[in-house]
Amino acid sequence: MDAEVGIIGGSGFYSLLDDAETVEIETDYGKPSDKVAIGTIGKKKVAFIPRHGSKHTIPPHKVPYRANIEAFNSLGVKRVISTSACGSLRREINLGQIVLFDQLVNMTHGRDETFFDKDEVVHVSTADPYCKGLRAYASIAATDLGFEHRDVGTVVVVNGPRFSTRAESKLFISQGFDLINMTQYPEAALVRERAMCYLGIGIVTDYDAGLVAGGSIEPVGYADVAKVFSQNVEKVKSVLKDLVGDLPKERDCVCGSALDGAMVKV
Ligand SMILES: [Zn+2]
């Protein structure tokens, strides 16, 4: 079994793949969130992992991030596309909008965030955690499909599973962050450590603690997130189909050399 592209997403994405079959993969870092579905989009072989498990039983702080990325790595995946819900910290970033993240701020703790915690010391650069090339292709796909989207956005990643306090939300807004999410880290860093490309596609599902627009919006609840996510999931599936189908075979970015010079040698 092998695959070129790995997609991480919510449940309900299986139907994205033609002729999908599921395989059980065990990695040095344990089992992924669920069985890995492998199928095709266009002519590309694609592997899919539901981040929270197919029955949504794994909370953000317990996702086996290392096992998920290592499972893709073991299949030969070179490009990882991550889909997720996110909250808006700006009134002008609307519900249902698609955002292609270009930066993140990690506020999580206690997660396994590196593959290199034994004998090797490796310092990869995460100055630009998202692949510029993949982001450009995704933007073209969203534009062609006529979907409202933003090509940049800084996402602050919090540990969860609870949503923000009003004071935390106020802090994040004052820092100029655009979006909030619970899963982009350590996914992005682990993908970089395996020299794969990473694209983060967010669906805006809520306004966090509701402080934007003068606090006139109710704070987010999970039911709102699930409702808006499910209303917009078809849009993301369309983008994924166009994007993956049209991706050039060879990568034209710097992600593949992420480990060059990153390893400490004595
Ligand atoms: Zn790349």
Image: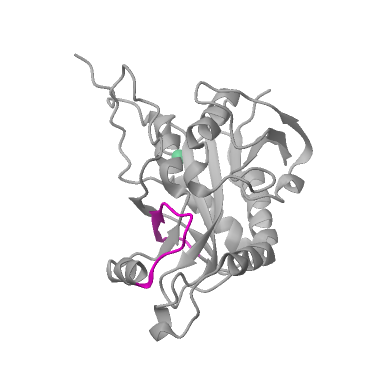
Q: Is residue 217 above or below residue 181?
A: below
Point out residue 221 in the picture as x, y percentages from the top left corner: 55, 69
Q: In percent of the image, x 45 and y 36: which residue is there?
A: 191
Q: Which residue lies furthest to the top in this view?
A: 266
Q: Is residue 232 magenta?
A: no
Q: Is residue 242 above or below residue 123?
A: below
Q: Does the magenta stretch include residue 164?
A: yes
Residue range of the region highlighted in magenta in the rendering = 150-166
Q: In this view, does 54 lie above or below 94?
A: above
Quadrant assignment, res 6 = top right
Quadrant assignment, res 125 = top left
Point out residue 25 in the picture as x, y percentages from the top left corner: 63, 25
Q: Which residue lies furthest to the right in this view?
A: 19
Quadrant assignment, res 1 = top right
Point out residue 92 in the picture as x, y percentages from the top left corner: 45, 77
Q: In percent of the image, x 73 and y 47: which residue is there?
A: 16
